[in-house]
Image: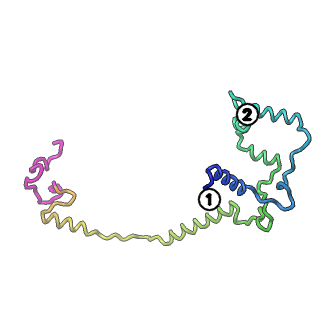
Amino acid sequence: MPLPSSMDDTADELARIRQLLRPPPIPGLQDWGIPPEPSEPCDEAIRAKTNNFLALKRDAENPRHFNDSLMSNRAFRNPHLYTKLVEFVDVDERTTNFPKHIWDPTDMKEEWYANRIAEAQKARSEATSASQHSSQRSRIDFAAGSSSSAHRQRVEAGKPGRHQPYNPSNRGGAYRSTGEGVLDGKGRDRSRWG
């Protein structure tokens, strides 16, 4: 049996994708309730407006798009424009297509409102800070560290401290360099400037 060509594979794939993208039919409605194309001629005023918009959009030198024109208009930069348009058209922004028993947008609980959420957050914050303040100590006892006695013993024994291995004399230690090493003892007791 010969393998199908790549053209047949592509056509089959496109047909399968179209079939998957096509919504299932609605019982009792033909073409999902979309009315057929009207048979009477189009209104000439509407046709002229549409042709004008298409000509502006298809202009080779300066193409114009309606949305771009709206966005560049200063009158449409008003932040309250959307609210005014919604009020003017009387659109309910909270409506839904779900049945009321599945989702009712008017069924709002009191604790869902912003002021109730803010009150709950404030109460939780106050409770947390109150519990932290009550558990804080009024006094912290400090104990002397053992490192100070170890340092004193090292100095008395004449050993250099671990942070001052080259010049312990300013710490009171008896350790002196023997002159061995990289600098042969030169310059260890003097600073760079004198």
Q: Secondary structure at mark 1?
A: loop
Quarter residue 129 falls in = bottom right
Residue with the mark numbered 1: 1
* Mark 2 residue type: Lys
At 77% from the left and 54% from the top, the residue drawn is 93
Q: If the image is split into quadrants, where does the C terminus sit?
A: top left
At 61% from the left and 63% from the top, the residue drawn is 122
Gap in angstroms between the C-alphas marked 2 and 1: 53 Å
Q: Secondary structure at mark 2?
A: helix
Q: Residue most toward the front?
A: 1
Q: Residue most toward the top?
A: 61
**Residue 110, placed above or below residue 167:** below
Residue with the mark numbered 2: 57
Q: What are the residue bounds of the magenta stretch? A: 166-194
Whether residue 17 appears in magenta in the rendering, the answer is no
Q: On the rendered structure, is 185 left or right of 103?
A: left
Q: On the rendered structure, is 141 left or right of 75?
A: left
Q: Earlier in the sequence, mark 2 or mark 1?
A: 1
Q: On the rendered structure, is 172 left or right of 53?
A: left
**Residue 77, placed above or below residue 116:** above
Q: Residue most toward the right?
A: 40
